[in-house]
Image (cartoon, rainbow, N blue to C red):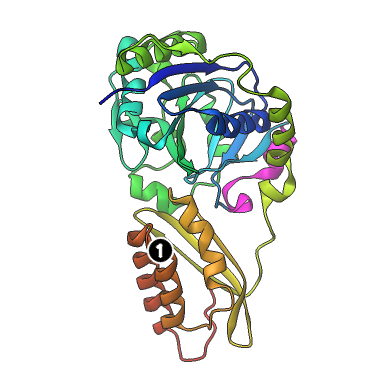
Amino acid sequence: MTLPVPLWLHTACTDPYRNLAREELLLEAVQPGELILYLWRNCHTVVIGRNQDSQRECDIAALEACGGRLARRLSGGGAVYHDLGNLNFTFLATQECYDVSRQLSVITEACRLLGIQTEVSGRNDLTAGGRKFSGNAFYASGGRCYHHGTLLLHTDISKMGRFLHVSRDKLARKGVPSVHARVTNLCAFCPGLTVGQMSDMLIEALGTVYGAAAQPFPEGRLDEDAVKGRASFYASDSWRFGRKRPTGLHFSTRFEWGDFQLYARLCEGCLRDVHIFSDAMDSDYISRLPQALENIPFSASEMARAIRRAGQGGNEEISLSIAGWLMEELCAETAGAIPKR
């Protein structure tokens, strides 16, 4: 197998909306036979997953009162806090060059070069000393893919607990009492570690893993005016906050693959204004569900059928788990009653 040509781009920009816009345009720009490593930082920002409920995941008022910003990314997964002590990475490639295991090995190799022993843990985490220092998420569009994540170097972890609303159930499943107990900074294992050192090690590890010295991403291949224009989308309230969730029906639970909330109105026995929120990694499937359930009769069998149909040819495991759970929830209700949850 021929490995892709490794390229890297490190931006000094700390604006979350421009950085997310640049990431999206890099995905459009990546060519067959190459892999891009994009390194970036955001200043005082909470970034939520594509299908998450901003009000549920973040104390927005407290964040904005301190000059922070809320951003939403294209990928699935959960909310994260970014400051200048956190280095973000994104691997971008066409489908044939995309290999999450190899990409993760760039991170673990960079840590090894710094004398830090790390492990891949759970669905999308990297740990050191049994604590998480990196969460990862994934996105694909038009035959191109990216894999991005955080690297906690010397982040103010206390602010994670202040601004992020992490459910007790999620923490219980991780076997920890708080966010602070679950995460760690890499400077705890490599005192004095700087963003510059970590960046240099990542670029060196990129060359090692892909068998050729990594080269800078060519200037001029990315239109910074286009980045600026696209940033307005990421900064918009309609993208960051989404539509206001309706009152009426509400179902909520947590699966092994993530949390799930369904909101809808009931009109003439059918679902209307369906909203689905989730930190599931499969952001595309979750995004399809509201349309799949719109105008469906409020019936266990009809809703389960629509959910399974939306998962055909995609993530059938998630669709079956949601459908089965809803069948149990609705069948447990008194016939004709509207659940109050």
Crowd band around label 1 with a 10 angstrom C-alpha radius: few (<14), some (14–19), many (20+): some
Q: Which residue is depicted at the point 50% across and 19% down?
A: 154
> In the image, 319: left or right of 43?
left
Q: Which residue is mark 1?
A: 311
Of 4 and 36, nearer the camera is: 4
Of 313 and 129, nearer the camera is: 313
> In the image, 72: left or right of 39?
right
Range drawn in magenta: 53-66
Against 17, residue 115 (above or below) is above
On the question of residue 231 being in view, the answer is yes
Is most of the magenta stretch helix, strand or loop? helix
Against 40, residue 236 (above or below) is below
Q: Which residue is depicted at the point 45% across and 37% down?
A: 145
- Magenta stretch: includes residue 64: yes
Of 70 and 102, nearer the camera is: 102
- Magenta stretch: includes residue 9: no
Name the image quarter holding residue 269. bottom right
Q: Which residue is depicted at the point 57% across and 48% down?
A: 57
Residue 261, percent across and down? Answer: 51, 62
Q: Indicate the quadrant containing the N terminus: top left, top right, bottom left or bottom right.
A: top left
Residue 61, percent across and down? Answer: 71, 43
**Amino acid at the residue labelled 1:** Gly
Q: Which residue is depicted at the point 42% across and 23% down?
A: 34
Residue 276, percent across and down? Answer: 54, 62
Name the image quarter holding residue 324. bottom left
Residue 69, percent across and down? Answer: 68, 35
> In the image, 163: left or right of 172?
right
